[in-house]
């Protein structure tokens, strides 16, 4: 790209330095666009950020990524980062404990598609032949339908029709669905679940791999992205909140923030849906989008970090619980925090009614039962994100706006836009990339 064409590229104003906004900013900066990135919080990262509690550095919630996160992995390549420096990649190893009864263990073997899933299920321990057959039959039905439903329904309704027993739902389907959609199966969208299953398990075997960050989340994307944007001449302002969007006949003319005014020619809103709704509502032009977004609901994610002695380790880095308060235990030795175990509880449930101490003790009691040799943790830190993601219900599929241009010079990004994925890092990144690609196409200089 020569200097003349770079000069002609417009400045793109991006609101929100979460993973969606960062993805858009990096992609556009790489193509020579000038970036003006405005973030309300003191740091970038949004809902996937580093936090400090006392003298310990933690993530605001343990995040797990999958091999299927192709857009995110591509973005890291744009930043010149190597996957192996950032993630530990392991084959999916689903070890589920039961507080009452026998658990389950499934490992995805190093075989090509579709043999990997078939062999994984046939070799699973903790399931009878009849149960394995039921899952395989259900899986075959999903594949035959091309992972598409004529009409969306809840995961529970679908699994009932597929005659999946209560035990199979408890041990196998529910943990996967809640982890993937952050929504309980009674209200989760089967179509969104099928989209995840299709991408993760029906294609390349490596898509089902788990990617565990080797560092805090800030060093996975936010920090390298900010460095890149600045190196390319972009501006990044943190601690600056967008308050008002001003428009004229041709669309947005300027914006008002807590630090002043910015003239705008191209505006990407990469804020969470609650903020996006509030910012767009006064403009009037986007009534259909803002009214629909009023009906999206939130789901929480709770993480309890527990510090055990350094020699305490979880086999396979991650293990699940199918009938407890805790859902997953993850070993933070992956990011050089030996002995630190994160217990993750996705979606809403009775745990949200518990006070911090009661919840902490309930999780520790489950640890004692599952790992009786472990001592008590010396410290614990509880992080509750009440608005972690939107609730991924069948209704949400009709409400989520399309990513990209919504008229004139406004583009929408964020995990809530309709990428077909639930609210995930991959969905956020994909939405940001989609905005960037549209802008590049619309403004390309021939
Ligand atoms: C605890 C937890 C665990 C999770 N676990 C996983 C996981 O294991 N795997 C996975 O894939 N996903 C996971 N997710 C989901 C994932 O973190 C989100 O989907 C993703 O981070 C959303 O990114 P985003 O850029 O769309 O939105 P956000 O991260 O919310 O970014 C929006 C940004 O906009 C800023 N902003 C808002 N209003 C304004 C304003 N007026 N002016 C300027 N800036 C503003 C915000 O401060 C924020 O930085 C988890 C989420 C949480 C909370």
Image (cartoon, helix red, strand yellow):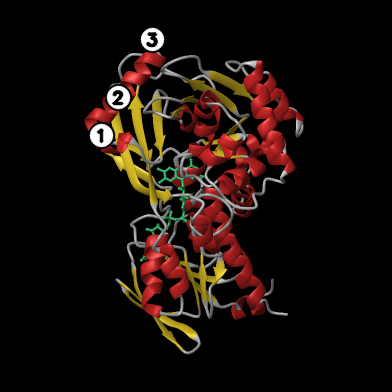
Mark 2 crowdedness (10 Å alpha carbons): few <14, some 14-19, many ≥20: some
For mark 2, what is the residue?
Answer: 362
Picture mark count: 3
Ligand 1 near label 3 (Cβ, under 8 Å)?
no
The image position of residue 332, as x and y in percent, is: 44, 29
Asked if 155 appears above or below 292 in the picture, the reply is above
Q: Residue at x 41, y 73 (%)?
A: 280
Q: Secondary structure at mark 1?
A: loop
The CA distance from mark 3 to mark 1 is 27 Å
Mark with earlier residue (3, 1): 1
Residue toward you, 339 or 184: 184
Would residue 262 be seen by someone viewing this image from the given angle? no
Residue beneath the point at 44% across and 65% down: 292
Q: Residue at x 44, y 49 (%)?
A: 391
Local crowd size for mark 1, using a 10 Å CA cut-off: few (<14), some (14–19), many (≥20): few
Instruction: Identify the residue under disc 1.
Output: 354
Per the model, the C-alpha gap separating discs 2 and 3 is 18 Å
Left or right of residue 258, residue 426 in this image: right
For the residues labelled 2 and 1, the Cα–Cα distance comes to 9 Å
**Residue 122, quarter of the rendered image:** top right
Q: Earlier in the sequence, mark 2 or mark 3?
A: 2
User: Residue 373's mark?
Assistant: 3
**Contact, mark 2 vs mark 1 (Cβ under 8 Å):** yes
């Amino acid at each position: 790209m020569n200097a003349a064409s770079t000069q002609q590229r417009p400045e793109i104003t991006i609101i929100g330095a979460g993973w969606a906004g960062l993805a858009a900013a990096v992609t556009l900066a790489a193509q020579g666009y000038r970036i003006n990135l405005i973030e309300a919080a003191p740091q970038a990262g949004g809902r996937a950020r580093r936090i400090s509690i006392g003298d310990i550095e933690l993530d605001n919630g343990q995040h797990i990524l999958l091999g299927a996160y192709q857009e995110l992995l591509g973005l890291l390549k744009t930043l010149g980062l190597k996957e192996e420096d950032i993630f530990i990649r392991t084959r999916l190893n689903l070890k589920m404990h039961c507080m009452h009864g026998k658990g389950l263990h499934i490992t995805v073997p190093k075989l090509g598609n579709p043999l990997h899933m078939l062999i994984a299920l046939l070799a699973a321990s903790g399931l009878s032949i009849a149960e394995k057959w039921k899952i395989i039959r259900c899986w075959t039905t999903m594949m035959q339908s091309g992972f598409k439903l004529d009409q969306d329904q809840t995961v529970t309704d679908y699994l009932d029709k597929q005659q999946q027993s209560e035990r199979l739902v408890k041990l196998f389907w529910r943990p996967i669905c809640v982890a993937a959609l952050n929504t309980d199966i009674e209200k989760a969208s089967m179509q969104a679940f099928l989209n995840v299953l299709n991408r993760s398990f029906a294609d390349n075997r490596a898509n089902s791999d788990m990617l565990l960050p080797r560092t805090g989340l800030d060093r996975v994307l936010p920090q390298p992205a900010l460095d890149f944007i600045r190196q390319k001449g972009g501006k990044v302002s943190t601690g600056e909140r967008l308050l008002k969007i001003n428009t004229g006949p041709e669309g947005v003319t300027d914006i008002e923030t807590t630090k002043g005014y910015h003239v705008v020619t191209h505006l990407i809103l990469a804020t969470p849906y609650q903020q996006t709704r509030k910012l767009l509502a006064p403009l009037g032009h986007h009534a259909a989008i803002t009214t629909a977004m009023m009906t999206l609901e939130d789901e929480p994610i709770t993480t309890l970090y527990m510090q055990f002695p350094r020699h305490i380790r979880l086999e396979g880095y991650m293990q699940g619980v199918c009938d407890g308060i805790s859902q997953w235990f993850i070993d933070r030795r992956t990011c050089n925090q030996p002995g630190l175990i994160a217990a993750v509880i996705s979606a809403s449930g009775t745990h949200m009614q518990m006070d911090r101490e009661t919840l902490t003790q309930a999780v520790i009691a489950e640890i004692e039962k599952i790992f009786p040799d472990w001592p008590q943790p010396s410290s614990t830190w509880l992080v509750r994100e009440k608005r972690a993601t939107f609730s991924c219900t069948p209704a949400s599929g009709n409400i989520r706006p399309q990513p990209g241009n919504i008229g004139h010079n406004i583009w929408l990004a964020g995990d809530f836009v309709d990428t077909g994925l639930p609210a995930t890092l991959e969905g956020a990144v994909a939405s940001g990339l989609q905005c960037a690609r549209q802008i590049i196409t619309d403004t390309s200089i021939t």
